[in-house]
């Protein structure tokens, strides 16, 4: 079992006592760990004492992966009557709600930070993962926030599994592509699938899907040039992958938004031509309103899976999915002029909150309190309080793989 080295930002072996407290792979991480000396106290970084001068502190834990944060997206779990799923689902709604204050809106970020941090430390302890270092970066994502004047800033990990970064990025993509989607009154959602595959075949399957899609795109392009089609392929596309715990297999698939029904049907037929083993009923075509189209910009896997009516976040299969999609794009557009993102992408939630706060301060994330805290005044940044149900989910339902199995 490894714990983060708060000095060098690398993982180091944990003491026995800390290992015991990192029993999070079997659940029960949050409270016990943060009482422990070996853990980074209150998720703080190598900051001797929090001061109100921001710059030197931020540089010490800037965990940028260097990858663009394009391509986050999709949806965690669809609205469900089941309370545990709803608890997670509600946290990941992206839309700003004018009914709420800036503080309450930022509380939603506290809520996903609370979940993400617990998930990140679990992922960082998945044995043999290629992404351990990146998971630790996610653990530290936005751990310290500096409020100065009209801005509230921190270091964000930009990893696509990070729900904090995903929320920010999704809001930006929705804004960026709104004009395109609004210009397609007849837009349709298309889901393209292939038969589920094993863990060992996930990367190869993903590559085959990509190659098949590229052949379709090329064919449409040729037909367009010959005057056989009015337009080349026009679509927004997202790669998603999910895990089926009952069958222990993986389901990589594409979701697309296309301008109209005819394009959707042509694409489906072409896909089935590329993948004869794919079933017609697996390829879904339906009209898309703006809300449905926005699903494309959200999370790229379901975090929560259900087995025997119990809901869990399973770290081992998620690690398989995250490794399989690492380094590639999950969101791409075809045949449209991609709108240019703002030079400096604005974090609207943070800006709105900064405008609401009167003082300048440094806020530090405290997992046990599920909020950023100004250590000098003791003031909470958002006053977010996880419901007992959500706290229980985060503390006991993030598991290695199945409730019975633990890592080696
Ligand atoms: Zn992040």
Image (cartoon, rainbow, N blue to C red):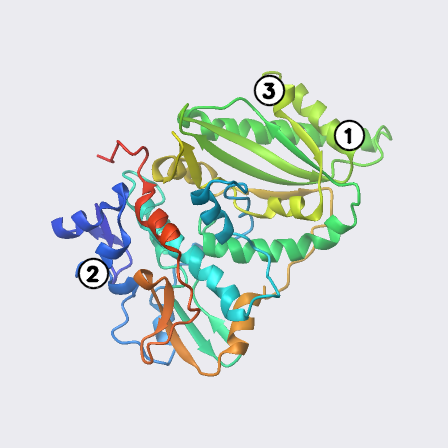
* x, y percent for residue 132: 32, 46
Within 10 Å of disc 2 (Cα), the crowding (few <14, some 14-19, many 20+) is some
How far is disc 2 from disc 3 in space, using C-alphas? 52 Å
Residue identifier under label 3: 278
Residue identifier under label 2: 35
Q: Quadrant of residue 269?
A: top right
- Tell me which residue sits at (38%, 68%) in the image: 372
Name the secondary structure under disc 2: loop
Name the secondary structure under disc 3: loop
Residue identifier under label 1: 222
In this rendering, the label closer to the viewer, 2 or 3: 2
* x, y percent for residue 298: 56, 47
Identify the mark nearer the N-term, 2 or 3.
Answer: 2
- Tell me which residue sits at (38%, 76%) in the image: 362
User: Among all residues in the image, which is located at the extreme right?
Assistant: 227
Q: Answer with left or right where residue 159 lies relative to residue 275.
A: left
155 in relation to 297, above or below: below
* x, y percent for residue 29: 27, 50
């Amino acid at each position: 079992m490894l714990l983060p080295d708060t000095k060098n930002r690398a993982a180091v072996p944990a003491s026995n006592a800390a290992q015991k407290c990192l029993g999070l792979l079997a659940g029960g991480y949050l409270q016990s760990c943060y009482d422990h000396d070996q853990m980074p106290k209150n998720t703080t970084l190598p900051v001797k004492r929090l001061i109100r001068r921001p710059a030197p502190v931020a540089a010490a834990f800037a965990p940028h992966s260097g990858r663009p944060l394009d391509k986050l997206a999709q949806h965690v779990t669809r609205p469900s009557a089941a309370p545990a799923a709803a608890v997670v689902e509600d946290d990941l709604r992206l839309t700003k709600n004018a009914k709420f204050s800036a503080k309450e809106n930022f509380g939603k970020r506290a809520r996903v930070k609370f979940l993400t941090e617990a998930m990140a430390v679990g992922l960082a302890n998945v044995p043999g993962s290629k992404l351990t270092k990146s998971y630790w970066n996610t653990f530290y994502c936005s751990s310290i926030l500096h409020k100065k004047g009209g801005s509230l800033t921190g270091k964000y990990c930009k990893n696509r599994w990070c729900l904090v970064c995903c929320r920010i990025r999704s809001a930006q993509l929705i804004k960026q592509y709104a004009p395109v989607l609004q210009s397609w009154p007849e837009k349709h959602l298309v889901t393209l699938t292939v038969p589920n595959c094993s863990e060992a075949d996930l990367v190869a399957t993903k590559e085959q899907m990509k190659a098949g899609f590229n052949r379709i795109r090329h064919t449409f392009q040729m037909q367009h040039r010959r005057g056989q089609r009015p337009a080349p392929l026009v679509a927004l596309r997202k790669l998603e992958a999910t895990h089926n715990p009952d069958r222990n297999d993986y389901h990589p698939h594409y979701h697309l938004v296309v301008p109209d029904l005819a394009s959707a049907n042509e694409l489906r037929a072409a896909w089935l031509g590329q993948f004869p083993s794919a079933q017609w009923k697996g390829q879904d075509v339906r009209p898309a309103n703006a809300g449905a189209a926005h699903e494309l910009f959200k999370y790229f896997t379901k975090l929560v899976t259900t087995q025997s009516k119990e809901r869990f976040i399973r770290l081992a299969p998620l690690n398989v999915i995250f490794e399989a999609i690492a380094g590639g794009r999950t969101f791409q557009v075809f045949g449209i002029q991609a709108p240019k993102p703002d030079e400096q992408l604005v974090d609207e939630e943070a800006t709105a909150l900064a405008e609401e706060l009167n003082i300048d301060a440094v806020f530090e994330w405290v997992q046990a309190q599920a909020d950023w805290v100004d250590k000098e005044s003791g003031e909470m940044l958002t006053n977010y309080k996880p419901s007992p149900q959500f706290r229980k989910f985060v503390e006991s339902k993030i598991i290695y793989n199945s409730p019975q199995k633990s890592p080696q």
